[in-house]
Amino acid sequence: MADQTQALLSVRDLKTHFMMDEGVVKAVDGVSFDVHAGRVFGIVGESGCGKSVTMKAVLRVVEPPGRIVGGSILLRRGEEMIDLAKLAPNGRQMRSIRGAEIALIPQEPMASFSPVHTIGNQIIETILLHRPVSKEEARGIAVQLLKDVGIPMPEQRLEAYSWQLSGGLRQRAIIAMALSCNPRLLIADEPTTAVDVTTQAQVLRLLRRLQAERNSAIIFITHDLGVIAQMADYVTVMYLGLVMEQGPVDAVFHTPRHPYTQALLRSVPSVDSAPRVKLPTISGSIPHPFNRPAGCPFHPRCSSAMAGKCDARTPALQPIEGEQAASCFLHHDVEVTP
Amino acid sequence: MTRPNAAPLLEVRHLRKHFLIRKGFVRKTVGTVRAVDDVSFSVNEGETLGLVGESGCGKTTTARCILRAMAPTSGQMLFRTSGGRTVDLAGLGRRELRPLRPQMQMIFQDPYGSLNPRMTLADIVGEPLLVNGMTGRRERTERVTELLRLVGMPPEYMQRFPHAFSGGQRQRIGIARALSVNPRLVVADEPVSALDVSVQAQILNLLLDLQERLHLTYLFVAHNLGVVKHICDRVAVMYVGKLVELADTETLYRTPRHPYTAALLAAVPVADPRIKTGNVELPGEVPSPAHPPPGCYFHLRCAYAVDRCKVEPPELREIGPAHAVACHRAEELSLPGIT
């Protein structure tokens, strides 16, 4: 892990559990990572791995019965670090951070815009809430934002409702709204899952351009290994609430250390493979979060699992080489301290 | 792996499906959505034909017309029945379709929405058998056991309900249901797009395996070009209701001849950080099938468009062995593919 002193956001041993009637679901169970300005930090994993809950915890919008039960979320402000995990979720301080310093690009732009207010009203409202400007100035900023994200005829689009826009334009509009207060940290939660592949390419290019121009940090959450390879500088691979592997994108994709990462990369159907050839698979399916296996959560599906070790103790995330770290007993013998 | 000598099981000719846009009290027709507009292709026995394109291109509508889940506006769909007869599915009524239905089955996209939560696996997989005359309970149970084994599900789970199973397992159940009546043509509409990566590969392998064992013919509708590459012998690309290119998989990916196919291939993010993809941006958006532009529907977004493309709609024509494309400039262009 990189030097914590320079990190914009440092998450340390974050635990978010859901207290259900049936028991406790440990959706996020000890996750640590650093996010730096000017870099894209990718979180990749399959359903139930805790990537979206991690994002919600950082924004402090985990809905009950979920609760942050441990760890810290340190956001840098000049020289001091604020622990978001300690703030009241609806308190003044958290509200001034959410949307202004940390903004979200959600997965479903259709569900994120109100259908009864114009795009313009919603963007202007955000600006007025967080920035000391007049309504006229806010309108000017909104027009400029729509122009920045490549929406043609921005003045007219301000008067449009979200359902009047196409999928691609709607996704651009939501990006404009997220950028409206110049956030230092952008969280993109599966921003291109709902759009077509050519639109996806447009949106990813836009995000890369905006990030370079503004030097902001992005946490990019996706299940798509192709998208993460193209977008991220640094990657975390999650499985059932735990980090399996972490490191620079090139190392994780070219020298994956964890059997889960290796198996995942092998099982992706790719456009450059031979047609009609069987793919290597990962046996079994992802367990329900209620029945998370004891020990390493991946051991029942792992081809290199060691009996008596992987099913009994949970490996901790340990550095392997350079900045690359993995939680696997194949590489070290350090377990998670309960 | 193409099987050049195989005879077509299904031949679609000039298929059209138009939806009328109606407005007002008297439901006056104010426009037409040409969801499928003059599409022709054939599916050979034992092969997998992929139908790809972006949302709204008409791939699902085409599939639904073939299964006669909806009636096409015009065109022919010639299906060779198990008796060796060739019938036009487009012209048949309910009663005539009935005996043909078991020969064409569908695998659905959403493994959650497509299984009735109040039915046990035995009922879900057994219902098509019951409907088609297998009334004996014991006989049916035996067949369901066999089918569940075939798709890799333990038959002991037969009395359970769908909620007890993961997405991948549910998709296996849906496949068992589709196969219960021994279909010859299986239409799979995005069968793996709702699944996680680690499970997706299992289902793709199962589909390949079943095809070999049961000599099935697949029409595989999908938008993920990686998935399509893995499972299809030939691929048809659709854009705004029209077929723009059709070729065997290797040829289409290596040497696309339509600028839209090339753009689609270039847009796929490759899971390798050392290969930077998505640098060639396709401008603009997919036009609405209610108001398509004149000429070639793609000309507004096409980097190679010339004056002719703005006025004259290109016909789908053969430009090589088993390679058809609808582009005026197909011969002169050299487009990048996947190497």
Image (spheres, helix red, strand yellow):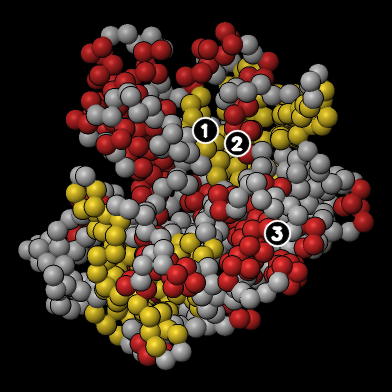
Of mark 2 and mark 1, the one earlier in the sequence is 2
Front residue of this view, candidates A290 and B162: A290
Disc 2 to disc 1, C-alpha distance: 10 Å
- Vertical relation: A159 (above or below) A10: above
Residue name at image x 17 percent, y 55 percent = A293
Q: Position of residue B321 (x, y in %)?
A: 69, 47
Disc 1 to disc 3, C-alpha distance: 44 Å
Q: Which mark is residue B187?
A: 1
Quadrant (top left/top right/bottom left/bottom right) for the C terminus of chain B? bottom right
- Vertical relation: B54 (above or below) A177: above
Q: Is label 2 or label 1 in front?
A: 2
Residue name at image x 26 percent, y 12 percent = B137
Q: Do dots 3 and 2 share one subunit?
A: no
Q: Do dots 2 and 1 share one subunit?
A: yes
Quarter of the image for residue A179 reads: bottom right
Q: Chain of mark 1?
A: B
Q: Do dots 1 and 3 share one subunit?
A: no
Q: Position of residue A155 (x, y in %)?
A: 79, 62
What residue is shown with label 3? Answer: A120
What residue is shown with label 2? Answer: B60
Q: Position of residue B323 (x, y in %)?
A: 69, 47
Kind of residue sitting beneath label 3: Gly
Q: Determine whether the residue tagged by mark 3 lies in a helix, strand or loop.
A: helix
